[in-house]
């Protein structure tokens, strides 16, 4: 206690210094730290009668800030915009302006829809790029294909998409139908691997009657390297107005059917190869397979 009294013994001298610092624009905290005055009562006495600098005055939330918030709201500002401008909470803003009418929309429904559409289109572009990147990486993982890999692929492809004999209807024939040009190409490459005579192949288009039949015939003939006159008669599918068919754009070319004349023996081998694959895949020592 004696030390504190000694510290503030020259009160008038200390007050002169405090007033001078105050008039220089220092805050109470700055003066306290500069003069080492730790007692708030003493500090109050030292600065008695001296107004604080303008920069230390806090705005009156019920006055200046509130009125400014109301002005901005009337100008059409949102709560978020007012919050950023004034640095106050949205809860306070809501209390201050809740009696004011909500700002009118600055965008028409059409403009808002256009903005939303552009945002969605940008998102779709990002997704498409990600999709293409994934496809490219996956494609590179395959690398070169051996004859055995092509052989197994072709067997599985035929068994998924080709005609199959049934116990109640024995039709041992090789007939393959697909709408994907890449699948058709792989199937023809597989037949070449099996040394199937190209002269034994017959091609026919299957397509809806409302489509561009002539265009489809020209496309498939060119794809497999023949002229349209070499195609067998096109099979037309009748149009069903009740069915909501999606494949109606210009890219629709129907399907191509590939038949192998005299292919009964080949069909039997395909059937055997397929069940050989099934047996190998179902082997009990899968974890030990090389």
Image (cartoon, helix red, strand yellow):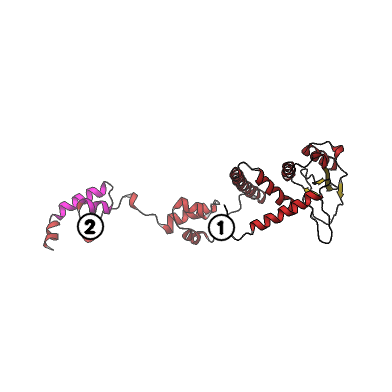
Between tags 1 and 2, which lies in front? 1
| Image coordinates for residue 226, horizontal then vertical, percent | 81, 36
The circle on residue 43 is 2
The circle on residue 287 is 1
Q: Residue furthest right?
A: 233
Q: Residue at x 71, y 50 (%)?
A: 155
Q: Tell me which corner region of the image, top left, top right, bottom left or bottom right, holds residue 65.
A: bottom left
Q: Tell me which corner region of the image, top left, top right, bottom left or bottom right, holds residue 233.
A: top right
- Left or right: residue 103 versus residue 39 is right
- Left or right: residue 2 versus residue 90 is left
Which quadrant is the N terminus positioned in?
bottom left
Our reading of the magenta stretch's main secondary structure is helix
Q: Residue at x 20, y 52 (%)?
A: 35
Q: Which residues are magenta?
A: 9-34
Residue 101 shows in the view: no
Residue 120 in the magenta stretch? The answer is: no
């Amino acid at each position: 206690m004696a030390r504190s009294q000694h510290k503030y013994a020259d009160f008038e001298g200390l007050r002169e210094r405090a007033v001078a610092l105050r008039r220089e624009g220092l805050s109470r905290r700055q003066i306290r730290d500069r003069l080492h005055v730790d007692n708030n009562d003493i500090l109050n006495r030292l600065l008695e009668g001296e107004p604080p600098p303008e920069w230390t005055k806090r705005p009156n939330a019920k006055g200046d800030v509130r009125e400014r918030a109301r002005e901005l709201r009337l100008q059409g500002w949102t709560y978020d915009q007012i919050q950023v401008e004034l640095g106050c909470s949205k809860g306070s803003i809501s209390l201050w302006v809740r009696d004011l009418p909500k700002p009118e929309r600055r965008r028409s429904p059409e403009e808002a829809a256009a903005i939303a559409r552009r945002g969605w289109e940008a998102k779709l572009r990002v997704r498409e790029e990600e999709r293409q990147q994934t496809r490219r990486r996956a494609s590179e993982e395959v690398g070169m294909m051996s004859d055995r890999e092509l052989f197994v692929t072709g067997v599985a492809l035929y068994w998924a998409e080709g005609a199959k004999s049934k116990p109640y209807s024995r039709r041992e024939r090789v007939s393959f139908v697909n709408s994907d040009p890449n699948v058709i190409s792989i199937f023809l490459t597989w037949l070449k691997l099996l040394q199937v005579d190209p002269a034994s192949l017959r091609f026919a288009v299957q397509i809806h009657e409302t489509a561009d039949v002539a265009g489809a015939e020209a496309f498939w003939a060119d794809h497999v390297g023949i002229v349209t006159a070499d195609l067998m008669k096109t099979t037309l599918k009748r149009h069903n107005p009740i069915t909501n068919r999606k494949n109606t754009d210009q890219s629709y070319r129907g399907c191509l059917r590939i038949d192998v004349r005299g292919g009964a023996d080949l069909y039997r081998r395909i059937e055997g190869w397929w069940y050989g694959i099934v047996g190998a895949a179902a082997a009990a020592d899968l974890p030990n397979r090389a």
